[in-house]
């Protein structure tokens, strides 16, 4: 399975990193971030991850023919959300999202802002109607979370669930 993870400039970059950390090793991960140095250092020992420069519009994942299965943007800034909703593809993150939409592949956006403006909500509704999964990092209170780490595991587990990635990251409701 080929999976693109894009990390944009909203707060919650840690969630994007931890999303990758919990992935099974047999998934081919393609990572795009606006903060390359930080993230490359973080993952230098992982050999299933390919790093892409956000300005490299000629990267493999910029083409539908590369056949990416799943694309996620975690966290997704309101800026990137707006561009994706308008079909703007001016960097590798927005291009990868545009490719996922045109190829009708799974695309998950984790918009991070509080509160959401009407513009952001309209952008989310527009994308949701195109089958884009709008899944902001919302805490769950039924899973016996005792720490921030538990909360993060809950949110990442819910993202994996909706993407069909098997996990036991959180205590399920019985
Ligand atoms: C410390 C800091 C935190 C930010 N947090 C958010 C955020 O949570 N959500 C958001 O939409 N933008 C946030 N921004 C603003 C974005 O970084 C800014 O809009 C940027 O242009 C987004 O660019 P990108 O979409 O290319 O990553 C934050 C900026 C800073 C400096």
Image (cartoon, grey):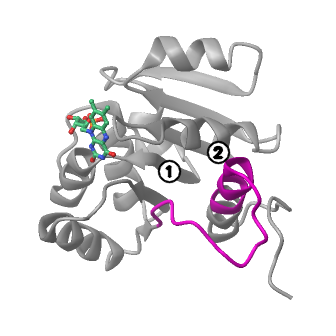
- State the predominant SS element of the stretch in magenta: loop
Mark 1 crowdedness (10 Å alpha carbons): few <14, some 14-19, many ≥20: many
Q: Give the residue displayed 40% in from the left and 68% down from the top.
A: 132
Q: Are marks 2 and 1 in contact (CB under 8 Å)?
A: yes
Relative to 28, 31 lies left or right: left
Disc 1: which residue = 72
How far from the left and from the top, in percent, is residue 98?
A: 31, 51
Mark 2 or mark 1, whichever is nearer to me: 2
Picture coordinates of residue 93, whole percent (x, y): 36, 37
Q: Between disc 2 and disc 1, whose residue precedes?
A: 2
Specify whether 43 is left or right of 61: right
Residue at the outermost bottom position: 174
User: In this picture, is 146 found above or below 142?
Assistant: above
| Quadrant assignment for ligand 1 | top left
Q: Is residue 79 left or right of residue 143?
A: left
Q: Residue 19 carries which label?
A: 2
């Amino acid at each position: 399975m080929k999976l693109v993870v894009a990390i944009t400039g909203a707060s919650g970059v840690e969630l994007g990193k931890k999303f990758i950390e919990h992935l099974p090793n047999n998934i081919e991960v393609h990572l795009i971030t606006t903060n390359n140095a930080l993230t490359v250092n973080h993952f230098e020992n992982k050999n299933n991850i390919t790093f892409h420069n956000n300005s490299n519009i000629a990267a493999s994942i910029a083409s539908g023919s590369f056949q990416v299965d799943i694309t996620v943007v975690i966290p997704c800034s309101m800026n990137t959300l707006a561009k994706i909703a308008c079909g703007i593809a001016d960097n590798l993150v927005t291009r990868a999202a545009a490719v996922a939409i045109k190829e009708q592949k799974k695309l998950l956006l984790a918009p991070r802002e509080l509160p959401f403006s009407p513009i952001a909500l309209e952008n989310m509704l527009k994308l949701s109607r195109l089958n884009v999964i709008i899944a902001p990092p919302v805490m769950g209170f039924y899973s016996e979370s005792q720490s921030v780490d538990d909360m993060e595991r809950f949110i990442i587990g819910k993202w994996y669930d909706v993407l069909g990635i098997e996990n036991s990251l959180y205590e399920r409701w019985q």
